């Protein structure tokens, strides 16, 4: 906070008189109340006593009713005294103008167990997105069906579909992992925790103070890979090649599914808490080779295994390969694993300005998006410590922490100037989701907080030109998960991957939004889409300032409102 | 790179060099307690008290050390060494905010208390306050231009700021100084950082050369071993990479418990 105030003061004292020079290029305004996102999240009680209480709930931004705008699902938790009967998860339907109405009851959702995260995918290929909700306890698959009375119903089909994983699941991702067209499911599991007999705090200390137990010392739970059988059911697949000893006992928190090596197959990256991260290279036929250590993403650049929380994807060095970003525990530095031309990753966090500044923070959800539409991707980070004891004056830290907003400037990410009240406030920040919720195409932000309201931030950055694309894949992969969208301009190539999974227990909107700056668009633009089946669509000079809807079958439409 | 690891480098340098936190254990000079701040002079602690407190800190008994130091600092707020030792109890527990406040007070009380400045600098570094840390180490080098640990810290700050040329110059300076001072560990560490720097600019052969030198001079440099394994892997030497990776694990085991992760 002090740094931001200094930046502002410095600007006032030394800056040129032009208002534009003082005006931050990234501007957000809180809109939680006006949007009607009125859920106060539940995740145990405050202050947190046990590890089960610290993750908080996730978010999905998706269009459940196919009306063209983004609706919001909030995975809500419960309390230790009755983890199966919390206040319930919620679905908010977008009225089309960035305000929401609670549609939970209308669509038939009655999910009161301790929900953690959410994945979105049209698992049955009917053209309507379904939800998979990870829980402490059996996970829930909500099938999006037509309501005979009109509208939609989200019906619990977990048991029939065979995906009611009973472990403590955190994140999950839909993706076509075997290349058969339908969406398989990867579920990340955390650890064994008994509410009736929580682990003892004895011997657990952080910064010299006694803290809650875990994850180290507690029993990890294995992740689950489900193959979609194409008939509305899944089967659990035994891990194949490469799932060696090292991958049996890790505390999973996050997952991204994307093609890291450009071979046309979707690979799986799993972020683990306090243990090595995993990178499963897809060998085809649901066979994988775990090669995180060899590839250089199991730990940070100095070999330190990190407590990975949230995951981001970005092409930071514009080499055409997706780089991985991991938010981690405090007293460590967030890590940008650059995906190099030689097929290896290298920790370049410091090079890109993302290391030192992150030391005091415990990071969770994150997202790289071009918030100010200037042609490069910026970064939003949710932060919040897990230990209430950080508020002890003798520790000198805080339990709640500031979110961080970075603007890409040249080769580096720099903390954005922000004097608005929302960014001076500390939050128990957890999951994030990003997308255009108010229909003006720029990227808005949602962040859950622990036992607090959702922070909804409307993007009020100066309007700029853009090119935006929504992909409609061939059924059953209607969300076109696994696609790569590139926009080539005279300034270079911008890329967006429609990856499975999200940053942390969450799902971002999938529209690819490319900033073109505030000056009138001149020169040629080339839009290329590599679809999940490797087919390529190329469009010369796509219309600017319009959302272009591209379908795999070749039709093209524009959404102008 | 972990904070604890950086600190171990500093302490290692201190143990071989002329400045160290051992110096904090020295007893006060009578004149170091300002008469103006203590109109009715409180009695000084018994002789050897600072050494005892330092011993407690080195044994990891921070609460016990604080129990002895806090009343002393309260009675003698201008006593830089006592304040510094109290700061050190927080610093060793990674409680950098209170450590920062106390180190700053110690420096205010006695700007010439040279043992405090590097600890204050690393505290600022650990809080991500690079500009302030940079100023602290630059100030330190003005009075001790041959102090390799300060050069090293500045080099780290340059690396964090992606100031590659400046970082290389500093680490090369350290190699020269450490060689003259026959400080093989610091010389090795500097080569290790040069290796890291060459990795960043994708000059893998130079990185390999520097990292190999690093582990010859300082075989316990687990970071250099890890980076060497990565470089060898990228150069296609899978066998060499595996050997380096195993040595890295052994060195890390020897060096320290893992920090920066949630404790179990």
Image (cartoon, grey):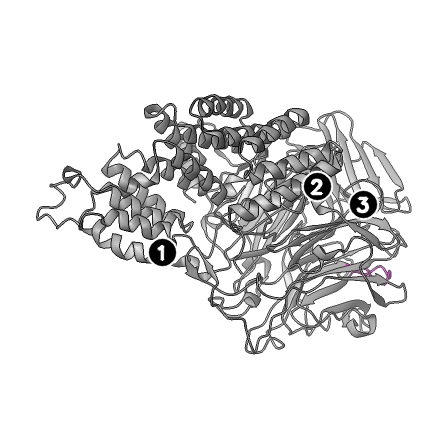
**Which residue was labeled with disc 1?**
B61
Q: Give me the C-alpha separation between circle 1 and circle 2.
A: 39 Å
> Looking at the image, is mark 1 or mark 3 nearer the viewer?
1
Q: Which residues are magenta?
A: A121-129
Residue appearing at x 46%, y 66% in the figure: A47
The location of residue A178, given as percent across then percent down, is 87, 54
Crowdedness near tag 2: few (<14), some (14–19) or many (≥20) residues, C-alpha within 10 Å: some
The location of residue A110, given as percent across then percent down, is 68, 74
Crowdedness near tag 3: few (<14), some (14–19) or many (≥20) residues, C-alpha within 10 Å: many
Please give the label number shown on residue A483.
3
User: Taking the image as drawn, is residue B157 in sight?
Assistant: no
Looking at the picture, tell me which residue is in the foreground, A263 or B94: B94
Looking at the picture, tell me which residue is in the foreground, A41 or B148: B148
Magenta segment, prevailing SS (helix, strand or loop): loop
Q: Give me the C-alpha separation between circle 1 and circle 3.
A: 56 Å
In the rendered image, residues at marks 2 and 3 fall on the same chain? no
Residue appearing at x 48%, y 24% in the figure: B170
Dot 1 or dot 2, earlier in sequence: 1
**Which residue was labeled with disc 2?**
B242
User: Which quarter shows the N terminus of chain B?
Assistant: top right
Secondary structure under the numbered disc 2 in the rendered image = helix
Please give the label number shown on residue A375.
none
Disc 1, disc 3: CB below 8 Å?
A: no
> Looking at the image, is mark 1 or mark 2 nearer the viewer?
2
The location of residue B99, given as percent across then percent down, is 35, 46
Q: Left of B52 or right of it: where is A489?
A: right
Q: Chain of mark 2?
A: B
Find out whether residue A281 is within the magenta segment.
no
Q: Residue furthest left?
A: B40
Secondary structure under the numbered disc 1 in the rendered image = loop
In the rendered image, residues at marks 1 and 3 fall on the same chain? no
The location of residue B247, given as percent across then percent down, is 62, 42
């Amino acid at each position: 906070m002090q740094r931001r105030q200094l930046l502002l003061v410095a600007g006032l004292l030394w800056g040129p008189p032009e208002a534009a020079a003082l005006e931050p290029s990234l501007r957000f305004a809180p809109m939680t109340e006006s949007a009607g996102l009125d859920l106060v999240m539940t995740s145990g009680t405050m202050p947190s006593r046990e590890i089960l209480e610290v993750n908080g709930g996730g978010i999905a931004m998706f269009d459940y009713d196919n009306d063209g705008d983004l609706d919001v699902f909030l995975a809500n938790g419960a309390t230790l005294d009755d983890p199966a009967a919390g206040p319930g998860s919620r679905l908010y339907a977008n009225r089309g103008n960035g305000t929401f109405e609670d549609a939970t009851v209308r669509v038939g959702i009655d999910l009161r167990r301790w929900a953690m995260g959410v994945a979105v995918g049209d698992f049955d290929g009917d053209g309507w997105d379904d939800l998979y909700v990870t829980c402490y306890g059996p996970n829930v698959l909500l099938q999006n069906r037509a309501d005979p009375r009109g509208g939609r119903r989200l019906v619990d089909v977990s048991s029939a579909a065979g995906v009611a994983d009973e472990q403590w699941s955190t994140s999950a991702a839909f993706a076509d992992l075997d290349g058969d067209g339908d969406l398989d499911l990867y579920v990340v599991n955390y650890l064994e925790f008994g509410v009736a007999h929580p682990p003892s705090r004895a011997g657990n200390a952080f910064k010299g103070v006694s803290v809650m137990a875990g994850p180290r010392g507690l029993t990890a739970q294995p992740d689950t890979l489900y193959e979609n059988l194409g008939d509305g059911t899944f089967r659990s697949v035994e891990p194949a090649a490469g799932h060696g000893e090292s991958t049996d006992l890790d505390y999973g928190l996050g997952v991204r599914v994307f093609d890291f090596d450009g071979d046309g197959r979707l690979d799986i990256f799993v972020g683990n808490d306090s243990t090595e991260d995993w990178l499963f290279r897809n060998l085809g036929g649901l066979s994988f080779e775990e090669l995180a250590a060899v590839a250089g993403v199991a730990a940070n650049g100095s070999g330190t295994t990190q407590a990975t929380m949230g995951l981001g994807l970005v092409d930071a060095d514009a080499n055409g390969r997706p780089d991985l970003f991991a938010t981690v525990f405090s007293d460590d530095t967030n890590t940008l694993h650059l995906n190099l031309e030689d097929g290896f990753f290298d920790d370049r966090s410091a090079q890109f300005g993302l290391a030192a500044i992150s030391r005091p923070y415990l990071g969770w959800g994150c997202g790289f998006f071009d918030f100010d539409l200037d042609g490069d991707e910026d970064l939003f980070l949710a932060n919040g410590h897990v230990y209430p004891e950080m508020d002890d004056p003798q520790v000198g830290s805080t339990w709640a922490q500031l979110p961080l907003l970075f603007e890409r400037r040249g080769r580096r990410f720099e903390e954005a100037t922000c004097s608005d009240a929302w960014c001076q406030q500390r939050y128990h920040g957890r999951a994030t989701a990003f997308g255009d919720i108010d229909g003006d195409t720029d990227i808005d932000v949602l962040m859950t907080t622990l036992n607090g309201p959702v922070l909804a931030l409307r993007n009020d950055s100066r309007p700029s030109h853009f090119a935006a694309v929504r992909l409609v894949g061939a059924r059953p992969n209607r969300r076109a998960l696994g696609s790569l969208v590139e926009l080539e301009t005279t300034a270079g190539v911008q890329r967006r991957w429609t990856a499975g999974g999200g940053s942390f227990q969450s799902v971002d909107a999938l529209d690819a939004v490319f900033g073109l700056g505030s000056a009138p668009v001149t020169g040629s633009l080339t839009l290329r889409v590599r679809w999940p089946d490797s087919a390529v669509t190329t469009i010369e000079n796509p219309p600017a300032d319009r959302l272009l809807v591209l379908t795999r079958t070749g039709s093209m439409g524009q959404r102008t409102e | 790179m972990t904070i604890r690891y950086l600190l171990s480098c500093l302490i290692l340098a201190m143990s071989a060099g002329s400045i160290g936190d051992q110096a904090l254990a020295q007893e006060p000079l009578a004149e170091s307690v300002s008469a103006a701040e203590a109109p009715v002079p409180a009695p000084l602690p018994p002789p050897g008290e600072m050494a005892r407190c330092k011993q407690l800190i080195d044994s990891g008994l921070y609460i016990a050390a604080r129990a002895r130091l806090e009343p002393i600092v309260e009675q003698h707020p201008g006593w830089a060494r006592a304040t510094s030792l109290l700061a050190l109890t927080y610093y060793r527990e990674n409680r950098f905010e209170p450590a920062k406040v106390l180190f700053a007070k110690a420096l205010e009380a006695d700007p010439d208390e040279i043992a405090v400045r590097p600890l204050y600098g690393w505290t600022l570094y650990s809080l991500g306050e690079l500009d302030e840390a940079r100023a602290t180490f630059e100030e330190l080098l003005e009075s001790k231009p041959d102090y390799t640990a300060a050069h090293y810290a500045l080099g780290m700050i340059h690396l964090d700021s992606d100031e590659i040329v400046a970082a290389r110059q500093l680490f090369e300076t350290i190699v020269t100084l450490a060689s003259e001072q026959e400080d093989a560990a610091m010389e090795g560490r500097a080569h290790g950082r040069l290796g890291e720097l060459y990795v960043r600019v994708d000059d893998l052969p130079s990185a390999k050369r520097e990292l190999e030198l690093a582990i010859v001079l300082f075989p316990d440099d687990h970071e250099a071993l890890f980076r060497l394994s990565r470089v060898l892997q990228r150069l296609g030497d899978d066998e060499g990479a595996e050997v380096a990776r195993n040595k890295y694990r052994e060195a890390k085991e020897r060096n320290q418990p893992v920090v920066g992760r949630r404790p179990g």
